[in-house]
């Protein structure tokens, strides 16, 4: 009797779990499908509005207009540069910071950890940070989108915890064989840390890819703007989309072959694709990196 109750309870739990997961999936999937279908739908149908759960007509002129816009192409290249270089810088400097903190006999381990923890709760503020960037001559420089904030206390703690899970005997054996600390880190520790590297790398590249606020504050040159900043301008100013568009886009809009919504949603899909393509390759490391990196404290 008891076994039947346990089996029934487990079945009910599994059913509720599946239903909730399906609901969450629909909540996240429907907006994406709506944006995708609007971007390829007929302009006259788009003007009518409503929820698009399937394409109404077929029109890819919005994508043509996006790729004909030189600002989009330039900003897309900028975003790739900022995301890739920023992620590599984050992983490199975070690993360098976390490695000594994972060594049990490191003399400054406790004070450095306390200092890093304090920075998680207290920030410098926007104006002091801007003044710091100005004094470092980073204003309107591409480096301002890559170097600042590449070392975060939370990421350092995750790296440190993961490194502590690697047997200390590996480091001791390497030291006996004459290896230095840098060689131990880059040839022994990091190759064993693919899970945490993939996890932090995924979080970082998504954040860098979607970054626009730093560009709004620190960049003034349009040729250095990331694609999210250009997309923001497009979404908040549909009139400017037609006024400042390239000749091809203006011609398409005059012929009613495309409307601003086609162009905006096409731009959204184009900016989403790289991250959606990267995630499946890192998924196998993702859960392992998150859970293993937070077991120890």
Image: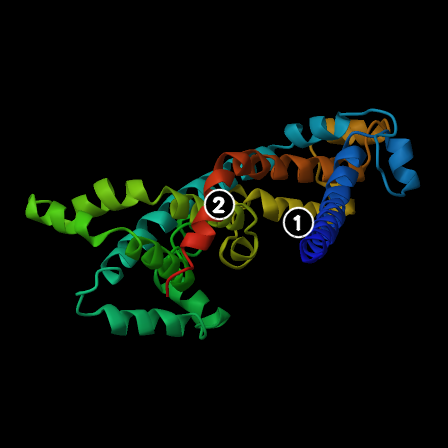
Model colouring: rainbow
Element assignment for label 1: helix
Q: Is residue 82 left or right of residue 261?
A: left
Residue at left 39%, top 66%?
132
Residue 63 is drawn in which quadrant?
top right
Residue found at the very far right of the displayed protein: 48
Q: Position of residue 121 (x, y in %)?
A: 45, 74
Quadrant containing the C terminus is: bottom left
Residue found at the very far front of the displayed protein: 1
Element assignment for label 2: helix
Foreground pick, 271 / 186: 186
How many numbered circles are shown? 2
Q: Is residue 188 left or right of residue 143?
A: left
Q: Position of residue 191 (x, y in %)?
A: 29, 40
The numbered disc on residue 286 is 2
Residue 227 is drawn in which quadrant?
top right
In the rendered view, would you say 167 is above or below 242? below
Q: Residues within 10 Å of mark 1 (few under 14, many from 20)?
A: few
Q: Position of residue 276 (x, y in %)?
A: 59, 37
Would you name the residue on which mark 1 appears? 232
Q: Is residue 100 left or right of residue 1?
A: left
Foreground pick, 119 / 263: 119
In the rendered view, would you say 137 is above or below 229? below
Residue 26 is drawn in which quadrant?
top right
Is residue 75 in view from this perspective?
yes
Foreground pick, 97 / 238: 97
Q: Position of residue 73 (x, y in %)?
A: 57, 33
Give the CA distance from mark 2 to mark 1.
30 Å
Foreground pick, 96 / 297: 297
The numbered disc on residue 194 is none
Label located before the other in sequence (2 or 1) = 1
Q: Residues within 10 Å of mark 2 (few under 14, many from 20)?
A: many
């Amino acid at each position: 009797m008891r076994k039947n109750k346990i089996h029934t309870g487990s079945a009910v739990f599994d059913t509720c779990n599946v239903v909730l997961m399906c609901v969450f999936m629909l909540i996240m999937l429907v907006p994406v499908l709506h944006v995708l279908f609007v971007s390829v739908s007929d302009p006259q149908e788009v003007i009518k509005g409503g929820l698009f759960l399937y394409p109404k007509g077929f029109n890819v002129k919005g994508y043509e207009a996006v790729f004909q816009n030189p600002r989009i192409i330039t900003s897309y290249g900028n975003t790739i540069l900022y995301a890739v270089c920023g992620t590599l810088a984050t992983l490199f400097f975070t690993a360098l910071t976390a490695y000594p903190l994972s060594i049990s006999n490191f003399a400054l381990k406790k004070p450095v950890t306390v200092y890093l923890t304090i920075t998680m709760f207290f920030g410098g503020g926007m104006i002091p940070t801007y003044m710091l960037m100005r004094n470092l001559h980073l204003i309107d420089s591409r480096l301002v989108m890559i170097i600042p904030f590449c070392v975060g206390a939370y990421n350092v703690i995750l790296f440190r915890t993961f490194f502590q899970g690697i047997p200390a005997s590996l480091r001791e054996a390497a030291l006996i064989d004459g290896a230095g600390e840098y060689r131990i880190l880059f040839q022994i520790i990091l190759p064993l840390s693919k899970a945490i590297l993939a996890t932090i790398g995924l979080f970082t590249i998504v954040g860098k890819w979607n970054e626009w606020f730093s560009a709004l504050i620190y960049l003034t040159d349009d040729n250095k703007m990331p694609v999210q900043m250009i997309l923001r301008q497009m979404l908040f100013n549909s009139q400017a989309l037609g006024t400042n568009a390239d000749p091809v886009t203006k011609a398409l809009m005059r012929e009613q072959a495309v409307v601003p919504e086609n162009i905006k949603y096409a731009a959204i899909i184009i900016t989403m694709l790289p991250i959606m393509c990267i995630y499946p390759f890192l998924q196998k490391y993702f859960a392992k990196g998150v859970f293993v990196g937070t077991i120890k404290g």
